[in-house]
Image: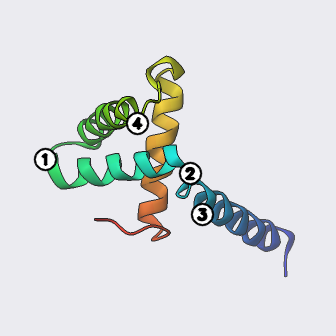
């Protein structure tokens, strides 16, 4: 096995472990729900869906007593993208 192949295998295992942990975290669950909400309810570009997911995540987090708005756009985009990758990879089911 080549070094690149080994690195790829290691990276895939690490990513799968991270995503598996992410989707069991309270904020991760909210992010997955927000991504699924946007996929079901928004007909538009990826940016439109991202913005809808971000709004939904902020609303759901606030309802759960968590202030994610103060985390900034980069952190919110990271949460949405991570949730999207978990859904896309089949680690958590799309609803």
**Residue 43 image label:** 1
**Percent from the top left, x then y, of residue 26?**
51, 47
Disc nearer the start of the sequence (4/1) = 1
**What residue is shown at x 25% (from left), y 47% (from top)?**
38
> From mark 3 to mark 2, how far is it between C-alphas?
9 Å
User: SS class of the residue under badge 3?
Assistant: helix
Disc nearer the start of the sequence (3/2) = 3
CB atoms of marks 2 and 4 within 8 Å: no
> From mark 1 to mark 3, how far is it between C-alphas?
28 Å
> From mark 3 to mark 4, how far is it between C-alphas?
22 Å
Where is 17 relative to 2, above or below?
above
The residue to which callout 2 is attached is 25
The residue to which callout 3 is attached is 20
Along the viewing direction, whichever of 10 and 78 lies nearer the viewer: 78
**Percent from the top left, x then y, of residue 29?**
45, 52
User: SS class of the residue under badge 1?
Assistant: loop
CB atoms of marks 1 and 3 within 8 Å: no
CB atoms of marks 1 and 2 within 8 Å: no
Q: Is residue 46 left or right of residue 2?
A: left
Q: Counting other residues with Cα less than 10 Å from the Cα at mark 3, is it few (<14), some (14-19), or many (20 or more)?
A: some
Q: Quadrant of the N terminus?
A: bottom right
**Residue 64 image label:** 4
């Amino acid at each position: 096995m080549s070094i690149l192949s080994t690195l790829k295998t290691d990276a895939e295992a690490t990513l799968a472990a991270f995503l598996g942990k992410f989707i069991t975290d309270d904020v991760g669950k909210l992010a997955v729900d927000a991504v699924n909400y946007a996929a079901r309810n928004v007909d538009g570009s990826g940016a439109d869906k991202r913005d809808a997911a971000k709004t939904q995540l902020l609303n759901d987090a606030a309802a759960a007593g968590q202030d994610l708005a103060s985390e900034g756009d980069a952190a919110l985009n990271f949460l949405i993208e991570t949730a999207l990758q978990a859904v896309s990879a089949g680690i958590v089911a799309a609803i």
